[in-house]
Amino acid sequence: MAAFGSLRHRRMIGRLRLASQQLSGDGATSVPDLVRWMTAMQAQDLPAALWAVGVRVPGAGIADVRAAIDSGTVVRSWPMRGTLHFVAPEDLRWMLDLTAGRLHRSIAGRHRQLEITWADVEKARDLALDRILADGPISRSGLFRVFDAGGQPTQGQRGIHLLGSLCRHGWLVLGPLSGNQQLVAAFDEWIPTSRIIEREEAVAEFLLRYFRSHGPATLRDFAWWTQLPLTEVRAALRHVQDQLVELEFDGTGYWLSPDVASLLDSGVPGGRSLHLLPGFDEFVLGYTDRAPVLSPEHSDLIVPGGNGVFKKTMVAAGRVIGTWALQGTGPRAAVVPELFDEAAPLGPAAQAALAKAARRYMTFLAT
């Protein structure tokens, strides 16, 4: 295990993560391949999630990401943390098998408040599948009307909790897009093949793929990301650690793929890079400890007031240096950055990189 203690080396973590997350180098070759590589991508904000995929696939437009969703080669559901993510269809069932039970237990109290029993979940399942198998995917509001008519009230978040339960049990899944909303589909019809893996093997695969796509990262990062018990995570590491490399930064062990670790010898890319990332992007949200890429004093500027809504971030050389927003519409729309440190404005090279990143984003939206 190589040890690195300097600030310069610690700041290298962000650039290595850019490489792991397909944000530097050649990027992914297609939308489905990118989502499969990333293992799971935060997707509760759909427009943000579309760009999170697009920024990692050179030349992709928003139509390409939407087409992958509409074809079912990328799916969106609640595989972990009670939060929507993009995943590859063949991975969703085994992820749900791993994580759903713990989440069900954690929200049991809320279900009691909402007067949701297991019989209610089964009734909602039957109502939903009867309607969808007869007439095809349905909007969320349409499904809630079906629930209400069938004696399962949806007010006061009861409807979304019923829908979430049905998705986590693998009966329903979010399917094709209808405008900026997704229709609800029957899992087995929308995803004819999704793997089933024994738990020990599944945790090991999850862990390996996370470190390959998100490394350098810690075991605690992964345990938080999946909400799997740390003891189980540590046991899984023994099965895959020979396929990973461990680096020590300031006394903390970080795991990553050998290919990305080798960049420390051949040259880590991204030293002059600048990326415009969406809110809720995995580069920021994919870790419980964000200090390697985001100074703690700037956290409130990313999530104002700790309200859980993450702003779009500007990332230079693997560090979050500010936020950005799209202002205006049509031909007058423009990317407007807001630096954390206004006393340190962008130099000419960074200004050019920002203009290039902004053009890439506008092209994505237009295609």
Image (cartoon, grey):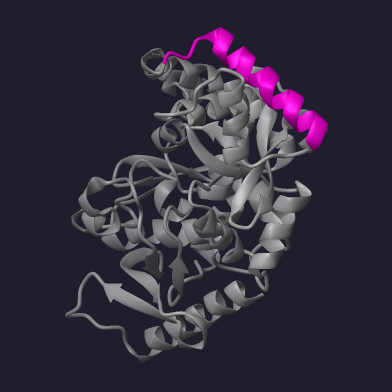
* Residue 357 lies in the magenta stretch: no
Looking at the rendered image, the quarter that the C terminus falls into is bottom right
Q: Is residue 61 left or right of residue 115?
A: right
Q: Is residue 240 visible?
A: no
Percent position of residue 311, x then y: 35, 59
Residue 11 visible in image: yes
Front-most of residues 212 and 189 = 189
User: Which residue shows up at 55% across the image and 67% down it?
Assistant: 24
Expressed as whole percent of the image width and height from the top left, the position of residue 156 reads 39, 29
- Tell me, yes or no, whether the highlighted magenta stretch contains residue 120: yes
Q: Residue furthest bottom?
A: 348
> Going by the image, does 351 lie left or right of 340?
right
Residue 67 or 199: which is nearer the viewer? 67
Q: Quadrant of the N terminus?
A: top left
**How many labels, in total?**
0
Viewer-proximal residue among 296 and 268: 296
Q: Residue furthest front?
A: 149
Q: Give the x, y percent position of residue 209.
A: 61, 40
Would you say the magenta stretch is mainly helix, strand or loop?
A: helix
The magenta region covers 115-135
Residue 333 sits above or below residue 105 on the image:
below
291 lies left or right of 102: left
Quarter where residue 353 is shown: bottom left
Rendered image quadrant of residue 352: bottom left
Front-most of 59 and 190?
190
Instruction: Estimate the x, y position of residue 73 in percent, counting from the top left.
Output: 75, 48
